[in-house]
Image (spheres, helix red, strand yellow):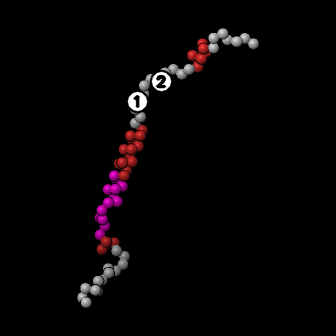
Amino acid sequence: MVLDPDPSDKREALERPPMPPGKPARAPWLALLAVLVLGLIGWWMMGGNTVDPETTSSTAPVVDTSQGQ
């Protein structure tokens, strides 16, 4: 069995090359923007009473009889 005299020569070949500096990640910002847009659309669609209860009511209106006494 023969030992290598200098194992550091092979170690350099196994190391990763340095990574170039990357751009900042856009995915978290896009996800946040999508959540805000969907939330605003939902708030806008659910807000307010735009239905007339007189035209959609399936029961007779309640008559207040306590005022005359």
Q: From the viewer's perspective, is residue 9 above or below residue 16?
A: above
- The quarter of the rendered structure image containing the N terminus is top right
Amino acid type of the residue tagged 2 in the rendering: Met
Q: Position of residue 54 (x, y in %)?
A: 30, 74
Horizontally, residue 25 falls left or right of residue 61, namely right
Q: Position of residue 25 (x, y in %)?
A: 41, 34
Q: Nearer the viewer, residue 27 or 14?
A: 14
Marker disc for residue 65: none
User: Mark 1 falls on what kind of element?
Assistant: loop
- Seen at 32% across and 60% down, the residue is 47
Say whether residue 43 is magenta.
yes
User: Mark 2 falls on what kind of element?
Assistant: loop
Residue denoted by label 1: 23
- Seen at 31% across and 72% down, the residue is 53
Marker disc for residue 19: 2
Horizontally, residue 63 falls left or right of residue 8, namely left
- Seen at 44% across and 23% down, the residue is 20
Q: Quadrant of residue 61?
A: bottom left
Amino acid type of the residue tagged 1 in the rendering: Lys
* Structural crowding at the residue carrying mark 1, measured as other residues with C-alpha within 10 Å and reported as few (<14), some (14–19) or many (≥20): few
Q: Quadrant of residue 24?
A: top left
Horizontally, residue 21 falls left or right of residue 46, namely right
Q: From the viewer's perspective, is residue 52 above or below residue 37?
A: below
Q: From the viewer's perspective, is residue 54 above or below residue 7?
A: below
Q: Position of residue 58 (x, y in %)?
A: 37, 76
State which region is magenta.
Answer: 40-52
- The quarter of the rendered structure image containing the C terminus is bottom left
Tally of marks: 2
Horizontally, residue 54 falls left or right of residue 1, namely left
Q: Residue furthest top?
A: 5
Say whether residue 65 is magenta.
no
Q: CA distance from mark 2 to mark 1?
A: 12 Å
